[in-house]
Amino acid sequence: MELTAKELHVRMGKKEIIKNASVFVKNKQFVGLIGPNGCGKSTLLKSIYKSLTPQSGSVFLGDLNVLKSSEKKVSQHLGVVGQFNEMSFDLTVEQMVLLGRTPHKKLLESDQADDYEIVEEALRRTRLQDYRTRSYLSLSGGEKQRVILARTIVQQPQLMILDEPTNHLDIRYQFEILSCVKQLGISVLAALHDLELAVMYCDYLYAVKDGEIYAHGRPEEVLTPETVEALYQIKCQTYINPVTKRLGFAYGV
Ligand SMILES: Nc1ncnc2c1ncn2[C@@H]1O[C@H](COP(=O)(O)OP(=O)(O)OP(=O)(O)O)[C@@H](O)[C@H]1O
């Protein structure tokens, strides 16, 4: 499913946080959002998935006018994996993942056999089968992140938005989460900090600076030393990593 977010403006108080930003995700494309801390990545994503209302602009998911549709309707097509996953009440892993079926249910409709099949498949994809009866609150940060991903998978979205999904995760979990998302074969828009991961997983990148889209294109087109230096204010040289044969980055040189 295609996402077309056009000319978004977000103001908080007097501060313009997002300035005329447009982002497109083609069907089944994995699109990355990069940029320094505080440049507006999360705010831009939130304005796309309706967690905050932009002052102006439009967001369409296929034909669906996201900003004018109910939350339930949007959740049937769009799933979000956010940065912070703390909760004050406790559920088992399986109960947490089942919650992802909610947008597809009528009020008070009970869980059906196919809901459990969909949950089973998501637990398998995220390698959580042995965790189903564990308390969510007892899990490590990386395990919690996998539960949130599983919950989003059972939502069966056609577009998944991820806000720094690999924050605080060790290298293996970073790969696991992004590989799992890539294998879903759906449209993805993900804010990422690690440029090598962005090169590895993204088909297309948007670079954000001071709330504006500073550059966009294929990762090799966007991630030039000049753009990386302009974004992050750090010296950078790029090279072809002899092992991965992909673009690599040497910082501070
Ligand atoms: N509710 C708010 N009120 C005022 N300013 C806000 C609010 N939310 C965000 N901001 C400001 O907007 C700017 C962009 O924040 P945002 O979280 O979108 O950045 P980010 O690129 O996602 O950063 P990071 O990489 O650190 O997560 C920051 O300067 C932040 O302080």
Image (cartoon, rainbow, N blue to C red):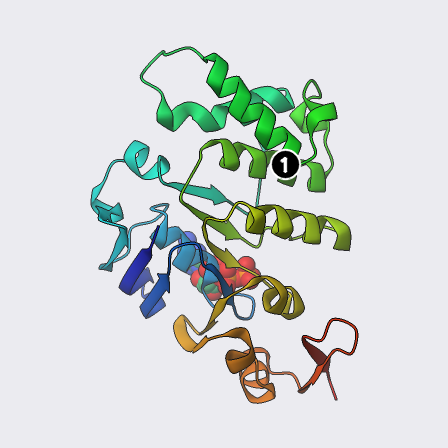
Could you tell me residue 94's position as x and y percent?
61, 21
Q: How many marks?
A: 1
Extreme-right residue of the structure: 243
Distance from mark 1 CB to nearest ligand 1 atom below 8 Å? no
Q: 100 or 11: which is nearer to us?
A: 100
Could you tell me residue 37's position as x and y percent?
56, 66
User: Residue 8, relative to residue 87: is it above or below?
Assistant: below
Q: 100 or 67: which is nearer to us?
A: 100
- Quarter of image, res 121: top right
Identify the residue at horizontal 31%, vertical 61% (top origin). 10
Residue 16 visible? The answer is no
Identify the residue at horizontal 42%, vertical 55% (top origin). 45
Report helix, strand or loop for mark 1.
helix
Residue 45 visible? The answer is yes
User: Residue 97, relative to residue 116: is it above or below?
Assistant: below
Could you tell me residue 156's position as x and y percent?
44, 35
Identify the residue at horizontal 53%, vertical 18% (top origin). 116
The quadrant in which the C terminus is found is bottom right
Q: Amino acid at mark 1?
A: Arg
Q: 68 or 159: which is nearer to us?
A: 159
Residues packed near mark 1 inside 10 Å, few (<14), some (14 to 19) or many (20 plus) = many
Could you tell me residue 120's position as x and y percent?
60, 24
Circle 1 residue = 125
User: Residue 151, relative to residue 184: is it above or below?
Assistant: above
